[in-house]
Amino acid sequence: MSNEKKYGLIVISAPSGAGKSTLCTRLLGDIPEKLALSISTTTRAPRGTERHAKEYFFTERNDFELKIKEDSFAEWAAVHQNYYGTLKSTLEKFWSEKKHVLLDIDVQGAESLRKLYPDRCFSVFISPPDMKELERRLRGRGTETEAAIQERMKHAHTEMKSKDDFHFVLVNDTFETAYQKLKASVLEGMSLIEEGKWPKRP
């Protein structure tokens, strides 16, 4: 039996406006020697200054669909007429570099990854303190139309129903407190994965 360390997935999901991106950015900055950010593959066109292999791997629809048939994706989804997915080869590349992989992903993607990698996937759901606070944060951005806010709130109610499927549920009330709890739980999850002691389900 090998004593070689295993490396896994740190999967973070949350409703839009819960503060997931800010928490993930801080986490990556704190432990870059142990953690790498997954790069998704997409069929949508680059926006602004986005670059291939930096923000996303940009590809053609036919190529993406071929990879689906070849079972090349760890998870994938169709969103607003475009495909998004995580290639198994991307994860394996980071694991070969002795790093855990951070994925900022929706609840369906998180479930796919838990099923595919049950012994090396640590999943965290970031919850707002309550739905009123979530709506306040979305409105505070000043970038959303009323229709978009209502759509995001509707989606958030659906996502909240899946929170108990995650290994750890974090309420993002005060940022610093939430971040320290997230970091501690992620470090513990990574240690358990490395030692081969990770439970198969939440």
Image (cartoon, rainbow, N blue to C red):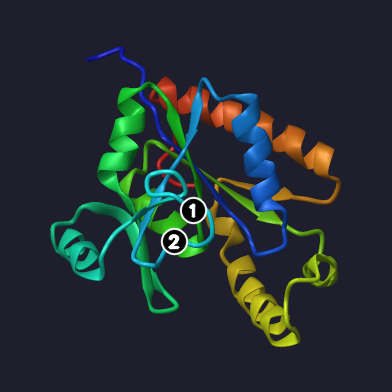
Residue 146, label in figure: none
Identify which residue is drawn at 37% across, 37% down: 119
Identify which residue is drawn at 42% across, 22% down: 194
Q: Residues within 10 Å of mark 2 (few under 14, many from 20)?
A: some
Identify which residue is drawn at 66% across, 76% down: 152
Q: Which residue is mark 2?
A: 46
Q: Is residue 197 visible?
A: no
Q: Which residue is mark 1?
A: 50
Residue type of the residue flagged with mark 2:
Pro
Tell me, yes or no, whether the two marked residues, 2 and 1, touch with CB atoms within 8 Å.
Answer: yes
Which sits in the foreground, 82 or 189? 82
Residue 23 in the image: above or below residue 184:
below
Q: Is residue 193 visible?
A: yes
Residue type of the residue flagged with mark 1:
Glu
Residue at the far front: name it. Answer: 49
Residue 4 in the image, given as x and y percentages of width and height: 31, 14
Identify which residue is drawn at 40% across, 66% down: 45
Q: Quadrant of residue 130?
A: bottom right
Residue 185 in the image, given as x and y percentages of width and height: 63, 33
Residue 134 in the image, given as x and y percentages of width and height: 78, 67
Taking the image as shown, residue 132 lies to the left or right of residue 98, namely right
Residue 81 in the image, given as x and y percentages of width and height: 39, 79
